[in-house]
Amino acid sequence: MTTAGARTESRSPSGAGAWNAAPSMADSPNVAVVRRAFDAFTLRDVERLVATCSPDVEFDLPTARLARTGKPYRGHEGVRTYMRDAARVWTELRLEAREFHETGDLVVAVGRVYAWGEGRVVDTPSAWVWKLRDRLVLRVTVYESRSEAFVAAGLAAD
């Protein structure tokens, strides 16, 4: 298992605080892809996010449970649909991945989610398990805790 460095705080284009996901010198190629995906989401750059994904990508995310009866988003068009759904469901949605752990073709990102919209407010720890193939995102699943994501990725919780 490898662990990539912490992120540094910067300002987002909208002026709100955001995490700068610029690659560190220690990032592996897979961690760099995951950081680029988080950056693309933060910037709401749909095509940049799509560019990090395999054509058969699958996003298994909480927004799907709110907007799509729980069905994961599939393929590049699914990523585009996710971004539209996220904009519709959430007035604000910030994903702040603060640490990255890698094992094989999996990257676990650990951080927080801040969101509000449609009568919901979310401020919670979160962890994402990213599966990559050929330096492209194949699947991302969100977990409510670091330990839950570590178990899903086959890592020992520390």
Image (tube, grey):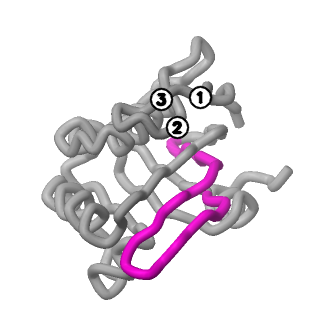
Number of numbered tags placed on the structure image = 3
Judged from the image, the secondary structure of the residue bearing numbered disc 1 is strand
* The residue positioned farthest toward the front in the image shown: 15
Magenta segment: does it hold 118?
A: yes
Q: Quadrant of the N terminus?
A: top right
Which residues lie in the magenta part?
Answer: 105-126
Q: Is residue 152 above or below residue 102?
A: below
Q: Quadrant of residue 8?
A: top right
Q: Earlier in the sequence, mark 3 or mark 2?
A: 3
Q: Are marks 1 and 2 in contact (CB under 8 Å)?
A: yes
Relative to 130, 1 lies left or right: right
* The residue positioned farthest toward the bottom in the image shown: 69
Nearer to the camera, 81 or 72: 81
Q: Are marks 3 and 2 in contact (CB under 8 Å)?
A: yes
* The residue positioned farthest toward the left in the image shown: 77
Q: Earlier in the sequence, mark 1 or mark 2?
A: 1
Q: CA distance from mark 1 to mark 2?
A: 7 Å
